[in-house]
Image (tube, coloured by chain):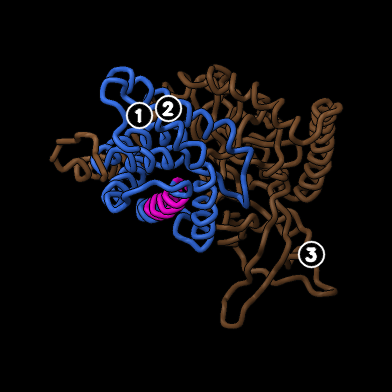
Chain colours: A blue, B brown
Amino acid sequence: MMIRRVRLVLLVVTLVVLQTTVFPHLRVFGAIPDLCLVATVAIAFEEGPQTGAIFGFVSGLVVDLFLASPLGLSALANSVTGYTVGVFQSGFVRESRTMPMVLGLIGGLIGGTIFAIVGGIAGQAGYLSLTSVRVIIVAAIYDSIVALAVFPFVRWANHDPDMGYSRR
Amino acid sequence: MVVYRRDARRRPVLLIVVLVSLVLVTVDSRGNGAIDTFRRVARDALQPVQSVVTSVFQPVRNAADGITGYGAVKDENALLKKRLADLEGRFLRQRAVGSQVGELGKLLDLPTIQDATGVAARVISGAPGNFERTLVINKGTSKGIDVGQPVVAGNGLVGKITQASSTEATVTLVDSPGFGVGVRLENSNERGIAEGRTGEREMRLNFLTKLLPACAKNSSPHTCISEGELVFTSAVANAAFPPDIPVAKVTGIEKKTGELESTVSLRPLVNLNDLTYVKVLHWPETTGG
C-alpha cells in the first residue's frame, strides 16, 4: 500500500513537471494536453468513480498551483471527470488497444468543458467563448494521443504488489 | 467478468471534493494571502526539478529541429533580435518624445520610463494551461521582482507580473483577455484603454476620451486615427505602467452601421509568441524621503 502511494505521488509530480516545462513548447494549434486529467481518467478506469474523484481532486489541486487560474478549478474539473468516467467504465467488459485513446478524448472533452464553464462563471475573462470550444476540442484530441503513454505509466504506479492488478 | 479493487467508501466523496473545490475557487478569485504563499512555496519546491528537466529537454528539442550548430545559431539569433528590438524601442520612444513636446510642461512632475530601473530575465516557459496567455521567467522575488511590476521587451510592453515566487515569476501578456492598459494615441494624444480580446491576438482601443474618426485624405492627424499610428502608455498619476512605453500599432478602424464609435484594432508591437529576454521594471520607483 505504501509503495503504491509513493508511486502515485511520483506519478503526479512527474506529470506536473512535464506539464509545466515540456508541453508548453509543444503546442498544437495553441493547445497542450492536460496530463493529470488523462491520469485521472486512467485511475478511474482502473479503480472506479470514488478513487477517480479523489485522485482527480488531488492531482488537479497540484496543477492549479502552477496555473494563473484560481486554485481549485482543475481540482473540480478533474474530480468530476474522474467520477464520471469511473461510473460509466463499469459497462466495459474488455480492454482494447484504442480504449486509452477513447477515454483520453472523452475525459479531455468533459474536463475541458467543466474548466471553461466554471472558470467563466468565476469571472475569468475569455473562458466562455468560441475560441475556448476550439481549444477544448484540440486539447482533447491531444489528450487522446498522450493517453497511449500515460495509461501504462498509471498502471505501473497503481500496481499494489500486495493485492495484484484489479483489472486485466 | 469485471473485478473491482475493493473500494468500500460510500461517503459522498464527489460532493465533498466538489464543495471544497468551489470554496477554493471562490476564495482564490477574491485574492488570498495564504493561497498565494502556498503557491510560492510549491513553485520554489519544484523549481530545481523543472530546471533539470528543462536542461535535459532543451537539447532534445534542438536535435529534433536539426542539429549542426542549430543551438548556437538560435542563441545568436535571439541576441540579435534583442539588439534589434532595443534599437526599435529607442526609435519608437523618440517618436513618443516628439509627439509629447506640447505636453512636456505638464509632465515635469511625473516620473518617466527613464527613471525606472529593472531586472533582465529570460523566458523559460509558455503558459502551462490552455486558457491563459502567460509566460514564466527565470527570476523572482529574490531578485526584487514583485506582483504588479510591468514587463517590457526592447520594442514595447509585454505585460505585467501576476505571480512570483523566489526563483521565478509569471507574466500575464498584454493581449490576454481582460488585461487593460491606459494608452494615448501618438498623433492626437487622446487617451483610452487598450484591451485584449478572447481568441484574438489583436487588441481593441476602447473608452477613448474623445471619439475620433478614421483619417481621410486631407485630415489633420491630430483630429483622427490613422492606420499605423502607435499607442503608448499614458502618463497619469499613480499609473500601473511608466508613461511612453510603446504598446501597439493601429491596424484597422471600422465603424459599423448603427454604432456610435469606431472599432479600433491594435496589434502589440512585441512578438509575444517569440520572446527570449524581457525586462521587469521596478515601478513605481520608491524614492527616498
Residue hosting label 2: A11
Element at badge 3? helix
Numbered disc in front, either 1 or 2: 1
Figure quadrant of the C terminus of chain A: top left
Chain letter for mark 2, please: A
Q: For this view, does A92 lie left or right of residue B193?
A: left
Vertical relation: A109 (above or below) B43: below
Vertical relation: A133 (above or below) B50: below
Whole-number angstrom distance, CA of label 3 to CA of label 1: 68 Å
Chain letter for mark 3, please: B
Chain letter for mark 1, please: A
| Amino acid type of the residue that numbered disc 3 sits on in the rendered structure | Pro
Element at badge 2? helix
Query: Label 3 neighbourhood size at 10 Å, few (<14), some (14-19), many (20+)?
Result: some
| Amino acid type of the residue that numbered disc 1 sits on in the rendered structure | Asn
Vertical relation: B250 (above or below) B8: below
Q: Relative to the observer, which residue lies in front, B260 or A107?
A: A107
| Amino acid type of the residue that numbered disc 2 sits on in the rendered structure | Leu
Q: For this view, does B225 lie left or right of residue A94?
A: right
Whole-number angstrom distance, CA of label 1 to CA of label 2: 9 Å
**Residue B236, image quadrant:** top right
- Identify the disc placed on residue A158: 1
Query: Label 2 neighbourhood size at 10 Å, few (<14), some (14-19), many (20+)?
Result: many
> Range of the magenta residues?
A100-115
Q: Relative to the observer, which residue lies in front, A64 or B63?
A: B63
Residue hosting label 3: B221
Query: Label 1 neighbourhood size at 10 Å, few (<14), some (14-19), many (20+)?
Result: many
* Residue positioned 85% across, 74% down in the render: B218
Q: How many marks?
A: 3
